[in-house]
Amino acid sequence: FELAEATGLPMFLHMRAAAEDFTDIVLRNRSRFTAGVVHSFTGTAEEAAALLAIDGIYIGINGCSLRAPESLEVVKLLPPDRIMLETDAPWCGIKATHAGSAHVKSTWPTNKKKEKKQPGECVK
């Protein structure tokens, strides 16, 4: 929180299997930062609600956030003005095996090898 406090810049936060402790730490330090995004959120509806109760906190959604049907239900509950869309490419894309893949309307040609990349292709 020191750097956020010194610069006034928002924070990019990771939370995995630590929602209660994480939320408590953020609340105790709320006066030290302007805003923040909880990156690659994969928590429950209750965890999202606790985070959204903190002014200035946004929920980051990417392919990892859309893996399971339960996760899609959580995302549906998030207020649009508190969502940050993330690519987290190429690590957390939406794969065909993810529940969220049924909702993907855009695709881009992708090459797994940087040295073989053609113009217009993404590199994974």
Image (tube, grey):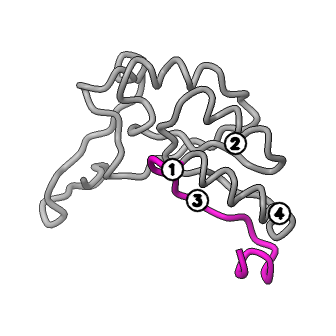
Disc 1 is placed on an element classified as: loop
Circle 1 is placed at which residue position? 18
Q: Residue at x 39, y 39 (%)?
A: 64
Q: Residue at x 64, y 34 (%)?
A: 48
Disc 2 is placed on an element classified as: helix
Q: Earlier in the sequence, mark 1 or mark 2?
A: 1
* Highlighted range, magenta: 1-18
Circle 2 is placed at which residue position? 51
Classify 116 as above or below 48.
below
Q: Earlier in the sequence, mark 2 or mark 3?
A: 3
* Amino acid beneath label 3: Leu
Is label 2 or label 4 in front?
2
Is label 1 or label 2 in front?
1
Is label 2 or label 3 in front?
2
* Amino acid beneath label 2: Leu
Circle 4 is placed at which residue position? 34
Q: Earlier in the sequence, mark 1 or mark 3?
A: 3
Q: Quadrant of residue 32?
A: bottom right
Q: Earlier in the sequence, mark 1 or mark 4?
A: 1
Q: Position of residue 70 (x, y in %)?
A: 44, 19
Residue contact between numbered discs 2 and 3, judged by CB atoms under 8 Å = no
The residues bearing labels 1 and 2 have C-alpha atoms spaced at a distance of 12 Å
Classify 29 as above or below 48.
below
Q: Position of residue 9 (x, y in %)?
A: 75, 71
Q: Quadrant of residue 50?
A: top right
* Amino acid beneath label 1: Ala
Is residue 3 part of the magenta span, yes or no?
Answer: yes
Is label 1 or label 4 in front?
1
The residues bearing labels 1 and 4 have C-alpha atoms spaced at a distance of 22 Å
Please name whichever residue, 63 or 71, is drawn nearer the observer in this view of the structure. Answer: 71
Circle 3 is placed at which residue position? 13
